[in-house]
Image: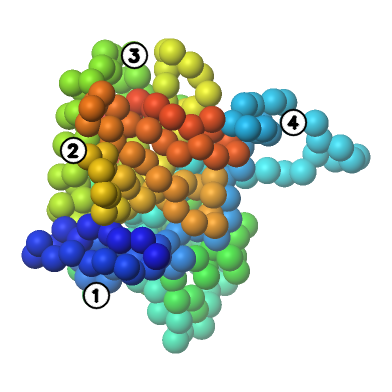
Amino acid sequence: MIALRIYTAGAVCVGICLSISSTVVAAGRPFSFGRDTFAFANETVFEFHDGHAYPRHETGPTKPKRFTNHCFVMSRSIIQFRKFARFDPALPPLEDEELAARIRKITSQRPWEPAFPEAERIVIPGYRDLRSLSEARTGIVQRNIGQGWTTYFRPGNWRILLPHGGAQQAKTHEALERSLERGEFFVAYLTNFPSSLNINHGVLVYAAKESGSDAARYLVYDSNHPDGPRTLEWSPGDSSFLYQRDTDFVGGRVVVWQVYGTFLQ
């Protein structure tokens, strides 16, 4: 059980499950990790041991087809499904071609635009939520949410070359807090360029945890890990972000840039 900070009407919710957060969109339904995220993972290009990357050594007559380089796309798509789609499990599921067309229509919407009114949302029939859709129709979803390679040419990528000391990271933290206060998501570009090259990743920050210390902690959807949320921490003492240690990251300090908040991000 983890306490989350609720940003609506100054209320505080304590002791609710990990799956519930404060992020609410036009429909008014709280975000649920087990309902509003993808059932499949964004697979890493390299294999990792204790957070360090090594070339993969595939065995067998053919190399397995892997779903890689989609961390930004999957983080963005969570927002697009939340803002522009509506699931109706009472209706029969669509054939592959029509389902693919609707997914493409949803993921072609600009993620920074206001959510569609409920009656105008793009309907996905036959499934209760994104998790059940992506579990049952994995290939259709993967092929139609967007190409991963295009994110390497995003307009905002050049910002990693800009100064990113404590003052700049403090502004990013303020932007993150404002996003959550408005009931919005915050897609974070995590990097530690140029000091190191062991993380270059996009994640979705969707709620703040209550913290007993000066540090602020946030729940994160990390597309590499569909099993449950990860944690991003803000350390006010040295104005820096810390990302949790995991199989594919050694943990510790990262530089955070917001993406998909505006057109040029």
Which of the image's four quarters has the N terminus?
bottom left
Specify the quadrant of the image occupied by residue 96. bottom right
Tag 1: residue type?
A: Ala
Q: Secondary structure at mark 4?
A: loop
Residue 236 position (above or below residue 160): below
Residue type highlighted by circle 2 = Ala
Q: Position of residue 198 (x, y in %)?
A: 53, 23
Question: In the structure shown, which secondary structural element does the residue marked by tag 1 occupy?
Answer: helix
3 or 2: mark nearer the eye = 2
Q: Residue at x 27, y 18 (%)?
A: 164
Q: Nearer the viewer, residue 78 or 196?
A: 196
Residue 211: give x, y in percent of width and height.
27, 49
- Quick one: label 1 or label 4, which is nearer the N terminus? 4
Residue for badge 1 = 119
- Say which residue label 4 marks: 56
Instruction: Give above or below for 84 relative to 111.
Output: below
Amino acid found under the numbered disc labelled 3: Leu
Give me the C-alpha separation between circle 4 and circle 3: 29 Å
Q: Secondary structure at mark 2?
A: helix
Which residue has dot 3 on it?
A: 161
Q: Extreme bottom residue here? A: 90
Label 4 crowd (10 A; few <14 / some 14-19 / many >=20): few
- Are discs 3 and 2 less than 8 Å apart at CB? no
Q: Position of residue 222 (x, y in %)?
A: 46, 46
Tag nearer the camera, 3 or 1: 3
Left or right: residue 161 compared with residue 72: left
Let me know if residue 225 appears in the view: yes
Q: Mark 2 or 1 closer to N-term? A: 1
Q: Which residue, given by chain and number where applicable, does mark 2 sit on?
A: 175
Element class at badge 3:
helix
Q: In the picture, which quadrant includes the C terminus?
A: top left
